Amino acid sequence: MANHPIISIKDLTYTYAATETPALRNINLTINEGEYVSLLGLNGSGKTSLLLCLNGIIPNMMMGEFEGSVVVDGFDTTEVPVRELAKLVGMVFDNPEFQISQWSIAEEIALGLENLGISPNEMVKRIRDMLEVVGLPRFEERSPWALSGGQQQRVSIASALAMYPKILVMDEPTSNLDPIGKEEVFQVANNLNLEKKMTIVVAEHEVEVMAAYADRIILMDNGEIILNGTPEEVFSQVDRFEKIGLRVPQVTAVTKNLEEAKKIKALKKYPVTVDQFYSLVNGLI
Amino acid sequence: MTKPIIECQGLTHIYKNTVVAVDNLNLKVLPGEVVGIIGQNGSGKTTLVKHFNGLLKPTKGKVLIDGRDTTTMKIQELAKTVGYVFQNPNQQLFAKTVESELEFGPRNIGCSEEEVIERREHAIEFFGLENIRLSHPYRIGFPLRKLVGMASIYTMKPKIYIVDEPTTGQDHITTKRVNNLINKLRDEGATIICVAHDMILLADIAQRMIVMKDSKIILDGKMKEVFLNFETIKSTHITPPQVTEVSRVLLQNKKIGKDDLCLTIPEMTTLLKKKIK
């Protein structure tokens, strides 16, 4: 499959109104259709601001100074209304309760669709289908308030998916969830990526999970992209992570320690998952 | 024998006469222990710990704090012994400056004005809050606000800290800072009960771990012993630290023994340095 860029960002610098330092500096980034991309960085490094540029909230609904260009599926975000971009880019935030407003799950999902002028019959079909996709079949008439956090977050994902977006953007979608909830959300995102070839862009702190799922890791610091590559390429820069106060997967850190102790030969790329690490040490002990 | 500082005898809690949230539970915690309590939401963790500071009273059974039955103690008395650090600091903080936030507790339990100031200053130093002492608690970032929440409990000098999800949604720097603070509290002799999903945090601070499922304690012991119950741990959907997962695979392939199970990066580094010739 030829790489088809679905997001293309050029020389993007953004400064929020009434602030002096840019939240995003000189961002150049291309994301291809079907990629699973993870954004890492400290709180305040610019992850959320970058995600808000993808659906046009920045600059269209925020005051501030915007330079450069963001093109999503061929549309320049400064030229297309946000409601059009909402069809292309589904957004899921960190706190599912902030996104929920209706008394039934069907109404919750219908809310976004009504704004798009979709017929009632089509709505019913999409709601049914998307609840299947997120593993909540026949949940239409239930109250979103009676769900667990993981289930609520999956309703948020279903709401985003019902618009048939090409890209699913998630901002720390599991930080308020328990382990089952986290597992559920990551599973759904992974299935969408593998089976529906959905492009996924997610900001997360869970490096071991991202090492297992993402095709590409982007590390941000002070509004800039400082590393961009496969999980193995990026996490191998252990020192860069430590310098800004982030960690790498545990097996990657252990590998570096073993390399420094000359217990293994020098590696260009360190393992990032349990399986990769096991194949490295299996023959040695 | 050391007397337990927390003791539950046949503790049962039933909400609204129907939902059994904690089911006939027996538990002893000794002074100075750092105990992690884990389990899915709804497993009974929060209901259990809310009995320690008297927010809930048993439906059946007894809870003894420092040897005294909580049903016979006033909330104010309990507050001096047991501090509860909320998961969400917004539920806890209400003053206009960090300083006045830290004065509230001591003043409320009847400390002299001199003592109030002394405790406030001690907390500012202990938690490293000098730069934000005059800030509004809602104007500082979420991670710092959490530290202020912890500091405001510290001013009460409780013997027992209940810390609910101290690192949720935090980046690595803040998590490390919280780790160090919890270890410092332990060094001062405090007993710490930490309710958390973050296994890497618990591996760094807790000696003992309690796993709850369906309103009962299903595992209780040293952290390593607990994690050796691979199937039970898996049934609770708890994700062990990545190095513990590697240990499990090495153990299954008979590359290491049971005593070699690792919970942290330094442990696994030391083990493999020894194993690789």
Image (cartoon, coloured by chain):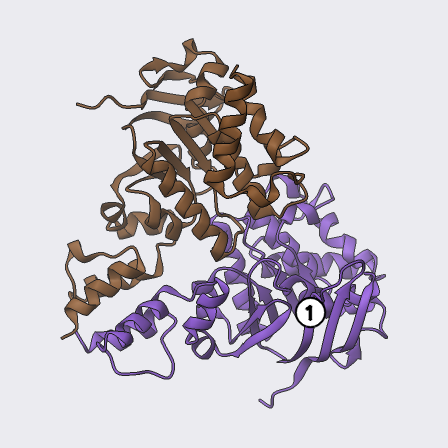
Please name whichever residue, A244 or A233, is drawn nearer the observer in this view of the structure: A244
- On the image, the x and y values in percent for residue A50 come to 68, 68
Chain identity for the colour purple used in the image: A
Q: Residue at x 75, y 69 (%)?
A: A14
User: B76 and A194: which one is in front?
Assistant: B76
Secondary element type, mark 1: strand
The quarter of the rendered structure image containing the N terminus of chain A is bottom right
Compared with B201, B11 (above or below) is above
- The residue at which mark 1 appears reads as A24
As displayed, is residue B175 above or below residue A266?
Answer: above
Numbered disc 1: what chain?
A
Which residue is found at the position 63% from the left and 80% from the top? A33
The chain drawn in brown is B
Q: Is residue A49 visible?
A: yes
Task: Out of B75 and A104, give the one closest to the viewer.
Answer: B75
Q: Residue A76's quadrant in the figure?
A: bottom right
In terms of image quadrants, where is residue A185?
Answer: bottom right
For the point 39% across and 49% down, the residue is B201
